[in-house]
Image (cartoon, rainbow, N blue to C red):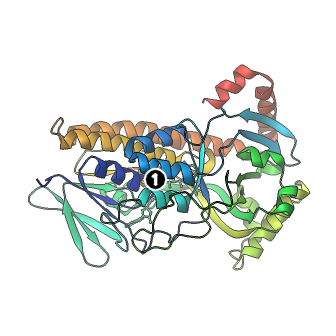
């Protein structure tokens, strides 16, 4: 029997693929359209940390064998989060619960490339690469048609915009929404782990996310990617999906870092050459001249240098629900200063899947259930946007604000109850 209800997802990113996995597992007709030509295009070399919220969503949507591949592809679980000053003096140390990689309660570091490979598992006939969505139209029968840059179209009952921060679906559905500059600029890079790098890297960075508050509102984030069995190939690693090559570096061990500050601090160095990797490193090292020499050495010897302006979505109220909806960064894109964007996208995917399963089973009407999904997603999604913005401001505070922030961290560090409250905020 053919299933009449068809879902079209724009974007084979974190949220879109998690939703596709969940719908496929429930026998709902679903297709995903991705603008990139292959699974590994433009994935960037950085990692994500999947929180317990993200893990639960993945556990709910993924077939057990795919969830196990996710576990096998994850890097070593973080033991703690450290806040330090620019000379590595501890401000606040938070111990994370001692969980194993298989637990949904762990903070699971995973490379973006590995995550996408796992999420593509078993979806070869559903995910279409090289399909850049441009707009949608209503059909006279009440369905929706998605149009692609190559002139092709597809029609279905629900269009889901999972197409990230610059979403074309959002631009068409909610043209009044805005994504604005925060005034913070970031430069990031990474350095492969070898004996010399291990010897120089501060020990906190091997324990987990390390947040360093420097002078004049400058900030450095660093974390190591290590695997329990670094030399082993991934057990049951994902087969090539849609013809894309399995990258050789998805178990690469490295230290990744991101330096950020208010844009005006970078201004004297920004010229035509400032997109060049060496120029970016020189700029960061100049701004970090008072920092610990080991950290400066790591940056000096790093590669994969890139820069971006930090932007954030402006919260919007609920809109009139129709047969086009959004998930993840397509609506509530946020700064990376709380590591929550991908986890929020995964939470959306699991919530939307629950709604669509009940619609498909005839248990609830589409628009009513979608409206509930959208209301809740707007609420927790923009709460995360606000929290990440507040965190961004905190770690870039200046002058007296900076001194108070550091004092606050030292005080929290002294009192376990305060620490617990800060950790669970
Ligand atoms: C440096 C950095 C570090 C981060 N670290 C973390 C972290 O540790 N934890 C965390 O939770 N989050 C983190 N994030 C945020 C996280 O990467 C995003 O929030 C998350 O990927 C959003 O998922 P998504 O599914 O909404 O969109 P994406 O994963 O961005 O996927 C969108 C997809 O849509 C495709 N697409 C776009 N336009 C079109 C179109 N017109 N047609 C077809 N396809 C299209 C894109 O190619 C992409 O594949 C980090 C972000 C950055 C920049």
Residue 350: give x, y in percent of width and height.
38, 42
In this rendered view, identify the residue nearer to me: 37 or 227: 227
Residue 136, by quadrant, is bottom left
Task: Give the answer, above or below, for where 414 lies relative to 46.
Answer: above
Residue 107: give x, y in percent of width and height.
60, 41
Task: Give the answer, above or below, for where 117 lies relative to 279.
Answer: above
How many numbered discs? 1
In this rendered view, identify the residue nearer to me: 266 or 382: 382
Q: Secondary structure at mark 1?
A: helix
Residue indicated by mark 1: 329
Residue 352: give x, y in percent of width and height.
33, 43
**Label 1 residue near ligand 1, CB within 8 Å:** yes
| Image point (29%, 52%), residue name | 24
Q: Residues within 10 Å of mark 1 (few under 14, many from 20)?
A: many
| Image point (68%, 43%), residue name | 78
Viewed as shown, does residue 101 lie left or right of 14? right
Q: Can the viewer see residue 154 in this picture?
A: yes
Q: Quadrant of the C terminus?
A: top right
Viewed as shown, does residue 216 lie left or right of 388? right
Residue 112, by quadrant, is bottom right
Task: Give the answer, above or below, for where 36 lies relative to 233.
Answer: below
Viewed as shown, does residue 390 lie left or right of 382? right
Given the current orientation, which residue lies at the most extreme left position? 141
In this rendered view, identify the residue nearer to me: 116 or 152: 116
Viewed as shown, does residue 103 lie left or right of 370? right
């Amino acid at each position: 029997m053919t299933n009449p209800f068809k879902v079209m997802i724009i974007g084979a990113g974190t949220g879109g693929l998690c939703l596709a996995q969940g719908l496929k597992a429930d026998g709902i007709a679903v297709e995903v359209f991705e603008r990139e030509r292959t699974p590994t295009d433009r994935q960037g070399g950085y990692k994500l940390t999947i929180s317990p919220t993200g893990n639960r969503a993945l556990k709910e949507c993924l077939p057990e064998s795919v969830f196990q591949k996710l576990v096998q592809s994850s890097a070593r679980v973080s033991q703690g989060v450290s806040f330090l000053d620019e000379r590595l003096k501890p401000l606040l140390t938070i111990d994370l619960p001692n969980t194993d990689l298989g637990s949904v309660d762990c903070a699971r570091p995973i490379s973006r490339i590995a995550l996408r490979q796992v999420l593509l598992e078993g979806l070869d006939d559903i995910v279409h690469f090289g399909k850049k969505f441009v707009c949608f139209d209503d059909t006279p029968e009440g369905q929706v048609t998605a149009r692609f840059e190559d002139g092709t179209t597809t029609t279905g009952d629900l269009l889901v915009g999972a197409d990230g921060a610059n979403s074309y679906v959002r631009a068409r559905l909610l043209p009044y929404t805005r994504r604005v500059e925060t005034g913070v600029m970031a430069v990031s890079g990474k350095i492969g782990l070898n004996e010399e790098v291990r010897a120089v890297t501060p020990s906190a960075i091997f324990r987990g996310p390390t947040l360093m508050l420097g002078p004049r509102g400058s900030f450095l984030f660093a974390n190591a990617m290590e695997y329990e069995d670094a030399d082993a190939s991934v057990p049951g690693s994902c087969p090539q999906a849609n013809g894309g090559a399995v990258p050789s570096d998805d178990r690469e061990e490295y230290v990744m870092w991101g330096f950020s500050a208010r844009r005006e601090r970078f201004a004297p160095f920004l010229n035509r050459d400032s997109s060049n990797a060496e120029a970016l490193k020189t700029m960061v090292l100049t701004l970090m001249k008072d920092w610990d020499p080991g950290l400066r050495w790591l940056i000096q010897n790093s590669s994969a240098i890139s820069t971006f302006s930090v932007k954030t979505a402006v919260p919007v109220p609920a809109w009139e629900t129709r047969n086009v909806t959004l998930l993840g960064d397509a609506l509530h894109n946020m700064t990376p200063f709380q590591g929550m964007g991908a986890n929020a996208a995964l939470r959306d995917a699991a919530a939307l899947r629950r709604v669509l399963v009940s619609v498909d089973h005839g248990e609830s009407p589409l628009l009513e259930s979608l409206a509930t999904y959208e209301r809740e997603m707007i609420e927790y999604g923009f709460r995360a946007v606000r929290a990440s913005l507040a965190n961004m401001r905190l770690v870039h505070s200046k002058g007296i604000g900076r001194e108070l922030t550091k004092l606050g961290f030292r005080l929290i560090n002294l009192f376990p109850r305060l620490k617990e409250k800060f950790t669970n905020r």
